[in-house]
Amino acid sequence: MTLPLSRIIPGYNPRRYFDRRKHEELVASLRLRGMLQPILVRPNPRHDTADTYLIVAGGRRYRAALEAFGPEGEVPVIIRVMTDQEALEAAIDENDVRDDASETEQADAAVRVLAACQDDRAEAARRLGWSKAKFDRRLALANLSDTVKLALDERRIKVGHAELLAAVPADKQDKALETILGSGLDVSKTRDLLMRVTQDLAGACFDKGECMTCPFNSAAQRALFETHIDDGHCTNAACFELKTQTAEMIRFEEQERADKAARIAASLAEDDPGDYADDDGQDDGTDESTHDITETPTAAVGAPQGAQAIASAQSVVPRKADSASKASGPTVTAKSIAGRTAELREASWRTALARALAGNAAHAHSTILVAAMTGTLPQIKSETLKARSGLLVDAAFPGLDYGAKIAAIEALQKPHAATILSAIGAAYARDVANFEHVADLARAFDVDLRATWQVDRAFLERYTKDELSFIARECGLIAHMGEKAFAKRLGGKKTDLVTGMLGAIGFDWAGRLPSCMTLEGRYGPPRVQADAPPTKIAA
């Protein structure tokens, strides 16, 4: 049948670019011969009346007909009842089979169909009739900025240029495009240019686990495109620099804690010489080994939280002036040890939570919302993020006025915004005053302290022999070595005891959390790894 153009409404059209010359040729053809091929339409399900129709296929003909005949001109149509999904797939298919369908149009179509398939890539590729490789390549091109997509549609750049730019953060693509067009760079020279501004992952000082699946890892581009830069390079300089600074900051803080622990140990040695053996290897007073290894750890007591709890929870082990004073001294408990470890415990958990939030934008987002709703978000130090805004957003960002900064934030691509959210969450973990908030977040997100901390010499040297004996027993070292062997170690110098504890043959401290370092005040054994499936043995 025929319909007036006023009753026809454009629907979803995968085509992004309309060549002006071809449009004018089509207008002239319509005026001369009329429309020979009908437009495919469907009843408009979103309109109050039943007298309008959505275009499924024929968008170019519709645009040309409006110019040739005006809104009251009538054109031939085929009316078919279709669901939104059926119309989407038909529109994509009709454009896809044309010789002049652009790669960017196919990229946008891939995004729409993937969303309709609930992110099932295999199903999306099947519906489009594409191979998995073609689907992945087109989906990767969807990361191009609109400016780069238009340049490719207009064939001002080649597909090779677009494939290289797809590996660059979207906020840097337009500037790179200007360089390519302004200097007339071919694909090979563009590749060389990008190689000079990428970061070599081999020299990275941070954990590269997340980089393995990152779209800005050049290895991901090599798997997709014929045109790519060398393996092992990061094309997201801002993210690389942020991870580098975070790793260096964490390393600096850990070194500070180690130095502080060493100073505390030295101070204890001066103030409490009874805890150390004399130069000849013999302790003052009676032998304490039997008392130490037969002391049974008491029931777990909740570890003190916050700086105010340090003094109240601290239990001082008495000096060994003589046997009588030692016998009547207070018993070493999880609580007494925790009191001496409060500062280290808090700093370590803050670091672990900050790392976890830096690597998980969703958890960082939840943290920011909770902080805002509880009024604790302002506790992030004003300079923490302000000083790094040039790195997190853009180098020019600090110098912009407030209105321009709003525009810059609004223009952020989702991956870039997620990186900034992660940085804000990590800053909150370090700066929030109440450590209980850190503890609650760590529990909610199942943060594992084992990923950032483990028993080492600096940790052990802060304790007395009685306390070292307690730690050795709860962590299973005494059971591993045997009572007599540990008693022999205990009878020597404290420095030798620490060395022996760390170097015990067949005993691994990794993954063992003494009660004084846990949030609940209970010893945390190494996490049990799931057993691998049994291998099949040939008959």
Image (spheres, rainbow, N blue to C red):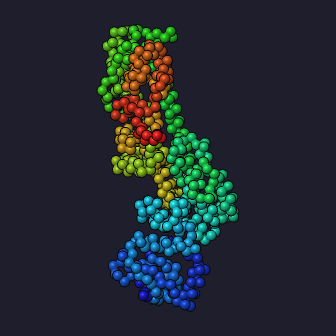
Q: Which residue lies furthest to the front in this view?
A: 539
- Where does residue 322 sit, x and y in percent of width and height? 38, 9
In this rendering, is residue 511 above or below 362?
above
Please indicate whether residue 436 sits to the left or right of residue 402 in the image.
Answer: left
- Where does residue 315 sit, x and y in percent of width and height? 35, 23
Closer to us: 351 or 114: 114
Q: Which quarter of the figure has residue 152?
A: bottom right
Could you tell me if residue 387 is visible in this image? no
In this rendering, is residue 259 above or below 52?
above
Closer to us: 498 or 118: 118
Closer to us: 158 or 416: 158
Residue at x-position 41% and y-position 72%: 86
Total tally of numbered discs in the picture: 0
Could you tell me if residue 405 is visible in this image? yes
In this rendering, is residue 290 above or below 369?
above
Closer to us: 156 or 135: 135
- Where does residue 127 sit, x and y in percent of width and height? 46, 66
Residue at x-position 46% and y-position 60%: 122
- Where does residue 186 sit, x and y in percent of width and height? 68, 62
Residue at x-position 39% and y-position 32%: 525
Please indicate whether residue 307 sits to the left or right of residue 122 in the image.
Answer: left
Q: Residue furthest bottom?
A: 32
Residue at x-position 55% and y-position 74%: 98
Quadrant including the N terminus:
bottom left
